[in-house]
Amino acid sequence: MPSKAALITCVLVVGSVLIGTVYRNASSAIDNESDKPSVENMLTDGIIRWSDQFHDMDLVGMSVFGSSRYGLTEDGSEDWNHLMPSGGHLVRFPLQPHSTSTSNNTTPSSADFTVTLFHELKCLSIYREEYMAVLASRHNSDSPPTSSSTRQPSPLVRHCLNYLRQRVLCRMDLKLEYNKDLHAKSSRQYETVCRDWERVYEAAEKNARGWSESHSK
């Protein structure tokens, strides 16, 4: 018959083995869970990688002058449409690995953000389209416009006008523009320096390609 000391030793050894097994299983489960990227981490990583593309942006020259392009014509509409990247005014950051995106998963596949540059251009295009619609309605009408028949601006147009007002105030340009006549009409031709907007377009196209490729598999 084993001694009391031997029994105690056996119990301690078996207990240590069981505790070690449970600990390893628990640690493995925790490690597996921590290996899964959280929504917050994936979103933060996407935003950081987007912003990192614009550190130390180059400066480029721009000639400010009147142009026959971007007018109130069909050709002008094409010019305005080409100001938008292929993905539109949005960039998308994934919130989960594409392999886990299923119909039963309640987490959205991406977080969509509007790039301010493209938001501003989009608003200008919307305002332009509204203006063209007003001109067309007046051209097709035989009666002169009255206060009751005047086309009212849409909520989207009002939003865009207010948004552009805020953006101009926030990103004010203090350059002096020469007034060439007594009516304070400023000169429309001069040289100025801007940040390289092509970098933003390249980043937007890269984002659109990445999103398209990940969802075409």
Image (tube, rainbow, N blue to C red):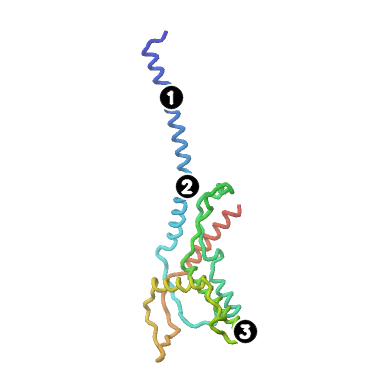
Residue 52: percent from left, percent from top: 43, 59
Which residue is denoted by mark 3 in the rendering?
Answer: 141
Compare residues 1 and 166 and report the one nearer the observer.
166
Task: Tell me the amino acid under the disc marked 2.
Answer: Pro
Q: Quadrant of residue 24?
A: top left
Residue 48: percent from left, percent from top: 43, 57
Which residue is denoted by mark 1 in the rendering?
Answer: 17
Q: Is mark 1 on a helix, strand or loop?
A: helix
Q: Do the residues bearing badges 1 and 3 touch, measured as CB atoms within 8 Å?
A: no
Q: Earlier in the sequence, mark 3 or mark 2?
A: 2
Q: Is mark 2 on a helix, strand or loop?
A: loop
Q: How crowded is mark 2: few (under 14 residues within 10 Å), some or many (20 or more)?
A: few
Task: Tell me the amino acid under the disc marked 3.
Answer: Ser
- What's the CA distance linking mark 1 and mark 2? 32 Å
Residue 142 is marked as none
Which mark is in front, 1 or 3?
3
Residue in the picture at 41% in, 77% down: 192
Residue in the picture at 44% in, 61% down: 53
- What's the CA distance linking mark 1 and mark 3? 91 Å
- What's the CA distance linking mark 3 and mark 2? 60 Å
Residue 51: percent from left, percent from top: 43, 60
User: Measured along the vertical axis of the image, is residue 144 above or below residue 61?
Assistant: below
Judge left or right: residue 116 versus residue 86. left
Q: Do the residues bearing badges 3 and 2 touch, measured as CB atoms within 8 Å?
A: no
Quadrant into which the N terminus falls: top left
Which residue is denoted by mark 2 in the rendering?
Answer: 37
Compare residues 207 and 108 and report the one nearer the observer.
108
Q: Residues within 10 Å of mark 3 (few under 14, many from 20)?
A: few
Q: Earlier in the sequence, mark 1 or mark 2?
A: 1
